Amino acid sequence: MNAKYPVLHPQVAMQSVDGLAVIVLADSGEVIVVNEIGSRIVELIDGKRSAEEVAVTIESEFTVTAEEARSDLEAFMQMLAEAGALRFDSR
């Protein structure tokens, strides 16, 4: 996992409802619904935490192994990036 700092695109809005997150991409009007873990990840990708820090937090808060947390996070961030909802800031 790289040392980049993931952050939601400024045109993205998110609302959590009953453990699910609804992510709206204002530019395209696309809506993405994610589960509880995806919702927590979206809350954590604030540009202040590295991807590694997000993975460690997910591992500590949910019943997943370190490997699962990292591989699932990578896949999730890739999906968000392809949708135009995520970017990476370097420090």
Image: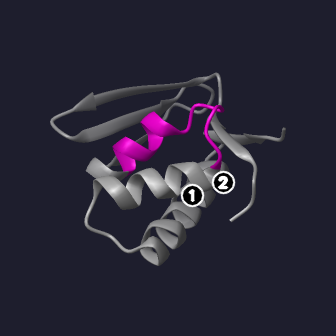
Residue drawn at 64 percent across, 22 percent down: 10
Q: Relative to 26, is 9 on the left or the right?
A: right
Q: Find the magenta span and give its range.
A: 38-50
Relative image position of residue 76 (x, y in whole percent): 51, 59
Q: Secondary structure at mark 1?
A: helix
Q: Nearer the viewer, residue 43 or 76?
A: 43
Residue drawn at 52 percent across, 49 percent down: 54
What is the spatial separation of the Cα atoms under label 2 and label 1, in whole angstroms? 5 Å
Amino acid bearing label 2: Glu
Quarter of the image where the C terminus is located:
top right
Residue drawn at 35 percent across, 57 percent down: 60
The answer to if 7 sits in the magenta stretch is: no
Q: Residue furthest left?
A: 18
Label 2 belongs to which residue?
82
Q: What is the basis of the colouring in this image?
A: one colour
Relative image position of residue 87 (x, y in whole percent): 71, 41
Relative image position of residue 53 (x, y in whole percent): 56, 50
* Residue 45 quadrant: top right
In the rendered image, the vertical position of residue 26 relative to residue 5, given as above or below: above
Label 1 belongs to which residue?
79
> Dot 2, crowdedness within 10 Å: few (<14), some or many (≥20)?
few
Q: Residue furthest right?
A: 91
The answer to if 45 sits in the magenta stretch is: yes
Q: Quick check: marks 2 and 1 in contact, CB under 8 Å?
A: yes
Asked if residue 35 shows in the view, the reply is: no
Residue drawn at 25 percent across, 66 percent down: 63
Amino acid bearing label 1: Met
Q: Relative to 81, is 66 on the left or the right?
A: left
Q: Nearer the viewer, residue 33 or 1?
A: 1
Relative image position of residue 68 (x, y in whole percent): 43, 74
Q: Relative to 24, is 37 on the left or the right?
A: left
> Dot 1, crowdedness within 10 Å: few (<14), some or many (≥20)?
few
